[in-house]
Amino acid sequence: MSAAPPGAAERVFAQFLGLEKQARQAGSTEQLGFSMVNDGQSLFGFRHAALLIAGKVQALTGISVVEPNAPFVAFVERAAGRLLDLGLLGEARPVDPAVLDDQARADWQDLSAAHAYWLPLKDRQGAPFGGLWLARDQGFTEAEQALLAQLADTYAHAWLALQPRKPWRLRWPGKKRLAVAAALALVLLVPVRQSVLAPAEVVPLGGRVVAAPLDGVIAEFLVKPNQGVAAGELLVRFDATGLKAQADVAERALGVAEAELKANTQRAFADAESSARIDLLAARVEQKRAERDYARQLLARSEVRAERAGIAVFADAERLTGKPVQTGERLMQIADPSQAELRIELPVSDAIALEPGAEVALFLDSDPLNRHEARLERSAYEAQATAAGQLAYRLDARFVDKPPRIGLRGTAKLFGGRAPLAYYLLRRPLAAARQSLGF
């Protein structure tokens, strides 16, 4: 401001109060930013102004939308970063071109006015969270600097009222960035123990599988899931209607053959033809006897009995009752309740190197707060499709202490060897990148 004519001070003061009022009336940070870089132009006569928050230009004089990659925007952000590195960002002062680097000075000559003034915006603790870059052809007087300092307090108060969250600091100094990068690199090299999660189920150890002995329809299950059974106890009964009829027919066919053989044997002394048929009829009797014995065996198989004592392990009797089954189809398993192991389905995408004896922790769905320890015993080399249609490796683990109840399911955590933290975090992204890009 130059020498003011009579009454000019009152007009300047009125304009200053108007700027403060507009700042307090702003309804959003966008409106406030636009007011900061445009409304004070008539009072202070700057050619252009830039508002920086957290090191990024948020508003420019005469510009409605800031282009982040514009040359002037890049210059102002570079200059503010240099002031931060030198510890000058918290001071309201004219900007000395000598403190900037060569690139910033060259950009200043091409893009900005001859004189620039940095006006910091500070929070309630006195730390700068942004500022105004004001540029014009002549320097700023002491009176103007005093008004700007007062106006900066108003702008900072209004901005924090609209955005109460603490803004991020502009940028860390170069040395601090290097120190943080070095610390992160060291942390990423720290060896950690690899681990994966996989679904698991408690299954019988050394159980005896009870399979369908014949093709037929199951009439009824005589035991319930997890029911204790004794050796020789009846477990399943098949529909034997057809088998009984088959056995009766075979028995009668055998009687007819034996009667025919007996009649020809009696006539053989007087009838040469009957004597010649004796061998054929004897063979037919043996054939019918074999058919009868086979029919009886099938009939005996219609009742399935337990070969050993234990508990009957199966899901649901209603699922198979009244439905046809094929020979060899699994019906249930007879197992010792005190002997159980852990069966794990490890997805191919989560597979890590696991050695026999590796530590395994089981967390049951029914009791997720308690941990059951186990040791890995076997792992399959070939992946197979699970019931969910996912390829997975089958792993078997033996419990260290008393096993949980057979049939319980949960999540198993498998522990592998140690590897750098960077590998632990980036193993799956690297595998996905290799599958996608082929490197």
Image: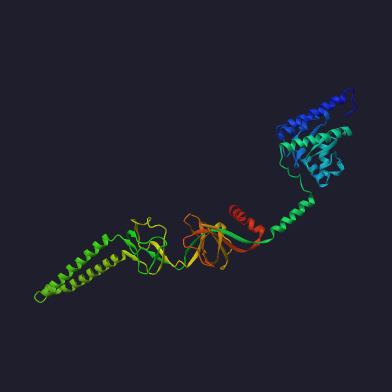
In the rendering, at what x and y percent does residue 348 appear?
54, 58
Does residue 61 appear in this view?
no
Which sits in the foreground, 406 or 253?
406
Residue depicted at x 16% and y 72%: 261
Q: Quadrant of the N terminus?
A: top right
Coloration of the structure image: rainbow
In the rendering, at what x and y percent does residue 234 appear?
34, 65
Q: Determine the residue located farthest toward the right in the rendered image.
A: 3
Which sits in the foreground, 278 or 87?
87
Instruction: Work out whether 237 lies above or below 143.
Output: below
Judged left or right of residue 270, residue 132 is right
Instruction: Work out whether 274 lies above or below 187.
Output: below
Judged left or right of residue 137, residue 158 is left
Which sits in the foreground, 427 or 224?
224
Q: Quadrant of the C terminus?
A: bottom right
Does residue 261 appear in this view?
yes
- Corner quadrant of residue 90: top right
Q: Determine the residue located farthest toward the top in the rendered image.
A: 6
In the rendering, at what x and y percent does residue 411 appear?
54, 58
- Corner quadrant of residue 240: bottom left
- Corner quadrant of residue 93: top right
Judged left or right of residue 410, residue 262 is left
Numbered marks: total: 0
In the rendering, at what x and y percent does residue 281 appear?
18, 71
Instruction: Work out whether 234 lies above or below 87.
Output: below
Which sits in the foreground, 68 or 57?
57
Q: Determine the residue located farthest toward the bottom in the rendered image.
A: 269
